[in-house]
Amino acid sequence: MQSQVKDSVMEAIGETPVVRLGRIFPGADVVAKLEYMNPGGSIKDRMVRHMLRHMPQGTVHVVESSSGNTGAALAMASAVLGLRCDVTVPDTTSCEKIKRIKAYGATVHPCAPDHGESAHGYHAVAERLAREHDAHYLDQYSTSLNREAHYRDTGPELWRQLAGEIDVFVCGIGSGGTISGIGRYLKERDARVRVIGVEPPNSAYRKLVTDQPADGPFGTRIEGVGKRQASSSFDPAVVDDVVQVPDEDALAWCKRLACEEGILAGGSSGCVAAGIAALLPRVRGLRVATVFPDSGAYYLSKYF
């Protein structure tokens, strides 16, 4: 008998389960990978692990800008690796996420959401902290390591768990790394796989993939999905279509996931579920797979 003991929580990342969503999508073949079952509580554990494997030798201090989950993953990893960690977040981030990051011993800096080139936005503040403290800035929104993590890790794992039986991959778009990395891997295995992104109204990604421009200003209550300006981690060549979902629909489906499937997932998962519901007439008879990035436990004060 072989021991299954891990040397640290970093080795426990991955192998999250895939479940069928047969109660909210009866008669359809829709499955979701529950990424909130990673030790840090989200899919961002995978990306952070991959990025830290590529950090400069001798790094003792790391900085990241995050809507919360990457910050928590980095704080968890920093605790294991003995790194000093600073995380900037928008001041709209849920209190549960902020407390979660602090619980690992990291310092959290609530900032204004980014609006153009504001020096007070959470991306700009992270860049300044890294410069002032000679720290390593991970910068998930710009690095190719973001999508590479999912190309090398999450994509192959999902393909294996589904035994290659997938027709459509639907994914929320935030930093853009998850959909770009998983989507690229799936299409390399089977060029017939369609990759469809989901985001809030007037987010920046749909216009990069379709000929539909935004028809108003971007704004959303849903954390971790949608951007005013597209991230360079996003690869539009991988994505076939993008659908946009109003916040009220995302939150309604978030509650349905909890009450009907027993899946307490975050708002971005509700956004994806609402997107799949809108797509059902186009994908009937096809296997649809998605990932649920994080848990609704991090938004109890905000969505439920």
Image (cartoon, grey):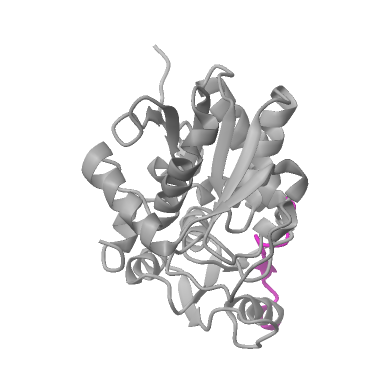
> Front-most of 222 and 278?
278
Q: Residue placed farthest to the top in the image? A: 1
The percent coordinates of residue 93 (x first, y second) are 42, 72
The relative height of residue 165 versus residue 20 in the rendered view (above or below) is: above
Q: Residue placed farthest to the left in the image? A: 259
The percent coordinates of residue 224 (x first, y second) are 50, 61
Write the residue at 50% across / 32% down: 289
The percent coordinates of residue 234 (x first, y second) are 70, 54
Q: Is residue 53 visible?
A: no
Write the residue at 40% across / 56% down: 250
Per the rendered image, the range of residues in magenta is 132-144
> Front-most of 295 and 29?
29
Instruction: Work out which quarter of the rendered image holds the N terminus and state it.
Output: top left
Main secondary structure found in the magenta portion: loop
Q: Is residue 113 visible?
A: yes
Write the residue at 27% across / 37% down: 261
Q: Quadrant of residue 205?
A: bottom right
Q: Residue placed farthest to the right in the image? A: 237
Q: Is residue 138 magenta?
A: yes
Q: Residue placed farthest to the bottom in the image? A: 119
Q: Is residue 241 magenta?
A: no
Q: Quadrant of residue 165?
A: top right
Instruction: Work out which quarter of the rendered image holds the C terminus and state it.
Output: bottom left
> Front-most of 210 and 199?
210
